[in-house]
Amino acid sequence: MSNHERVNIPPKPTSAPRSAALQASMDTSMLAVVQASPQAAMQASPYTQQQPAATHLNVGRTPSTILAEHAPPAEPEAESSGGSMRSSAVRSSASMAIGTMASRILGFVKGIVLGIAIAGSSVTVANIFEGANNLPNLIFLMIAGGVFNAVLIPQIAKASKQPDKGTDFISRLLTLGVIGLLVLTAVVMALVTPIMGLSTSFTGKNLELAITFGLFLLPQIFFYGLFSLLGQVLNAHNSFKAYAWAPVLNNVVAIAGLLVFIAVSGRATTNPHTVDNWTTGQTWMLAGTATLGIIVQSAVLLIPVHRLGLKLRPKFGWRGTGLGATAKVAVWTMGTMIIGNLSFIVILRVATIPAGGDGGPGSGSTIPGLFALNRATELYIMPHSIIALSIATVMFTAMAHAAASKDLAGLRTSLAGALRTTGMATVFAAVALVVLSGPFGMLFSGGYETTGRQIGVTLSILAIGAPFYSINFILNRVFYAQENARTPFTIQCIMVCIGLGTALLASLLPEEFIIYGLAASYTLTNVLGPVVSHVLLRKRLGDYGGGLIMRAHMRFVIAALASGIVGELGLRLFGSSSTGGFMWSSIGASAVTLAVVGSVMAAVYVLVLKQLRVAEVDAVLNPLLAKVRGRLPSRR
């Protein structure tokens, strides 16, 4: 293999231009947005920092991702005195990484416990809860999310450098933000009946239960906003740990609420929960504790904000603060957010058709619904959030630096290296998710095989588009590195039209196939996304090594298919081909199956890559192996 085919990721520059550093600081984890809909990550811009999600799974951010997401803009001239600041950031990154990883693990556990609680032989209640639980996140992102993150982040960072550390501005900002959030939340709750009726396909008793859930869940809008505001204040003052650890408390509270629910109401497999036998007490335990977790997540940030010593207090009068000028700069980004999230309302309505009904016996109880789609989404997006997001965050500063210097060759090199390195992991992940979709589905099924199979089928359809999803994400980072938000907006509009068209076609399918049709819609959109982005990017950037990238990906595909064949044979040993087989027997059995077969598949994949002389595998594994060897006791 020639040297040109090897991974060539330039080192992160020590100081990026002001505009580049600002955008790098706003690059975000897309997972939280994705949890509302699989298409959301592709559609959100890099300014949507740490958007809240109803489930807040928080899968897969690395220390570099966290620093890029949360660090305030860095001034180039601060390089001479920046050593101590960077050293402090490195020291705190370990704690932040542990906090975010703990939150992801707990979020995964929460999904499993949620399945045990409400996903048994009848998943109607689970589908209704998922539909209601999506709305607070969607509404916040659509109306307030873009404003908070695209407009306020640079203003808070700028104000923090004032002699009063931004006390006056932040006081006015928090006052405005709290009032705006209270008004927004009150209006939405007052309109809960028409909002729920328009955004979902629930009718009759199912709609009544969805409205009840909404009254408990929609207050999350206020606390999502408060969490975002307080988090940005902390970030602007170089305080990151609390923001990283707060979601852990959210998940702990939510899991505790689900465990109480199971203790009082029983598992869904042994005590089926239906719309007819559902009680107010169960709503308090399920939806009430979900909102309580968001409240705790937000309230805990008040402590570190108080320790900043800013002496914040309610303060009115917002003229001359500069917010108007900043809002004009963010118009394209906010337009992207609005269009994307409006489309999700339509998709949510289609996804709730299977659980629509009137709440009568058997209404949408045994066919796949929104619960299966959301659980499959959380699984299929994990490779992106763990791998592609981390690489893109690290690479974004290098891309922005090259773009600011008009170094198109360096920009092309960074992009090609990021695509090849990401592909090595995401191609395998896609094949692994398809092969292991059954045992993965069982983890969230509550131990009920039919539900596990439904999640598994949905996951296998979504997984096909996983590598394309990450490719499109990285291609769009190049536009933002060039300070071009208009082209991603154009791409957004094209993909939304395709996604809505295919989603509406899915709504015409028989109810038992609608969720599978939606999954196919997402996959088709994910596959077409990189095609559109590539065409537009090539006009601006020229050839960025497409032939070498395709050649590398073909080797990844060969190795992944080899591991997939081995994995499929391994699953047969665990009873995958028979109803009631070992891997379908319980959540624990599926976990054992995943651990054994998944490990074998990963080993086969690496071995085949080695045989194919793929340079990327050494570029990724050698640093990890060096760290492991460094921790082993020396032999003397």
Image: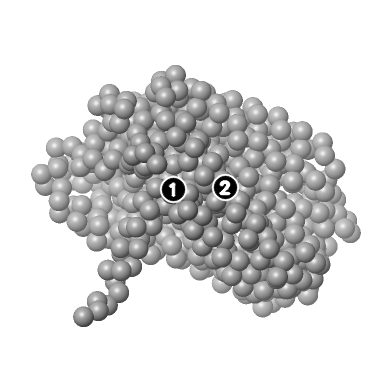
Q: Is residue 564 above or below residue 256?
A: above
Q: Position of residue 336 (x, y in %)?
A: 51, 30
Q: Secondary structure at mark 2?
A: helix
Neighbourhood count class around disc 2 (C-alpha, 10 Å): few under 14, some 14–19, many 20 upward: some
Residue type, numbered disc 1 = Val
Whether residue 400 sits left or right of residue 188 in the image: it is: left
In the rendered image, the residue lying farthest to the left is 80
Q: Is residue 626 above or below residue 183?
A: below
- Using the image, tell me which numbered label, if any, was put on residue 558: 2
The quarter of the rendered structure image containing the N terminus is top left
Q: Secondary structure at mark 1?
A: loop
Whether residue 263 sits left or right of residue 482 in the image: it is: right
> Can you see residue 569?
yes
Q: Is residue 26 above or below residue 235?
A: above
Of residues 533 and 412, the one drawn nearer to the viewer in this rendering: 412
- Using the image, tell me which numbered label, if any, was put on residue 439: none
Q: Position of residue 462 (x, y in %)?
A: 65, 46
The quarter of the rendered structure image containing the C terminus is bottom left
Which residue is painted at 27% across and 68% down in the image? Answer: 630
Whether residue 488 sits left or right of residue 63 in the image: it is: right
Q: How many marks?
A: 2
Query: Which residue is under mark 1?
Result: 614
Q: Is residue 420 above or below residue 457?
A: above
Whether residue 3 sits left or right of residue 160 in the image: it is: right
